[in-house]
Amino acid sequence: MPTRLPAAAFTLIEGPAKVTLHVNGQDHTLSLEPRVTLLDALRERLHLTGTKKGCDHGQCGACTVLVDGRRTLSCLSLAMSVQDTRITTVEGLADGERLHPLQAAFLAHDAFQCGFCTPGQLCSAMGLLSEGRPHDDAAIREGMSGNLCRCGAYPNILAAIRDVRDQA
């Protein structure tokens, strides 16, 4: 039988609430309904449209961002739940005009055919590489298995990630 938490364990939030999101090194204070996802806050309120809305059910990975360096599906995360964290979107990967090595490798290997899944692929690959060096192609494929590419650029994406892994 499930254990019931006492009613005092919950804080009911009704209506918009102030939420401060630390995105790509900048704080943004927003007034959001508690049900707003991180994805919608990024795209619709902060106009960071690099993060894509794909399936909106956490199955395609197009909305992947980094939260405190960990891969996170922004369509399944409530914006309120990621306050006091560091959120990195694809817009935050480059250093000004200088591309991140992973972005440069994606370009070099033509790993972004239609480009729709690319932001999620890049953020997921960043997370994968920071979690530890995937030792072989099978580990890269397994680590990236949550990100779907409708164009089938998987060999190119694999080559790009392998290049960056081997450069470090």
Image (cartoon, rainbow, N blue to C red):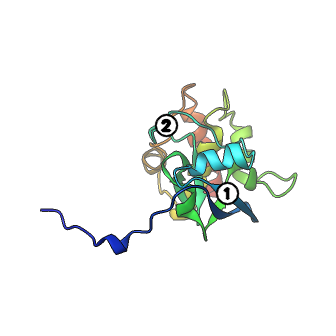
Q: Amino acid at mark 1?
A: Ser
Determine the residue positioned at 55% across, 34% down.
54
The quarter of the picture where the N terminus appears is bottom left
**Taking the image as drawn, is residue 128 in sight?**
no
In this view, the residue farthest toward the right is 97
> Residue 125: where, in percent of width, then height?
58, 51
Sequence order check, earlier mark of 2 and 1: 1
Quadrant of residue 153 in the image? top right
Q: CA distance from mark 2 to mark 1?
A: 28 Å
* In-front residue for pair 67/114: 67
- SS state under label 1: strand
> Residue 140: where, in percent of width, then height?
49, 49
Q: Residues within 10 Å of mark 1 (few under 14, many from 20)?
A: few
* In-front residue for pair 130/66: 66
**Taking the image as drawn, is residue 56 in sight?**
yes
| Residue to which mark 2 is pinned | 60
* In-front residue for pair 35/119: 35
Determine the residue positioned at 65% across, 53% down.
164
Vertical placement of residue 36 versus 62, above or below: below
| Residue to which mark 1 is pinned | 31
Determine the residue positioned at 45% across, 39% down.
57
Vertical placement of residue 166 versus 107, above or below: below
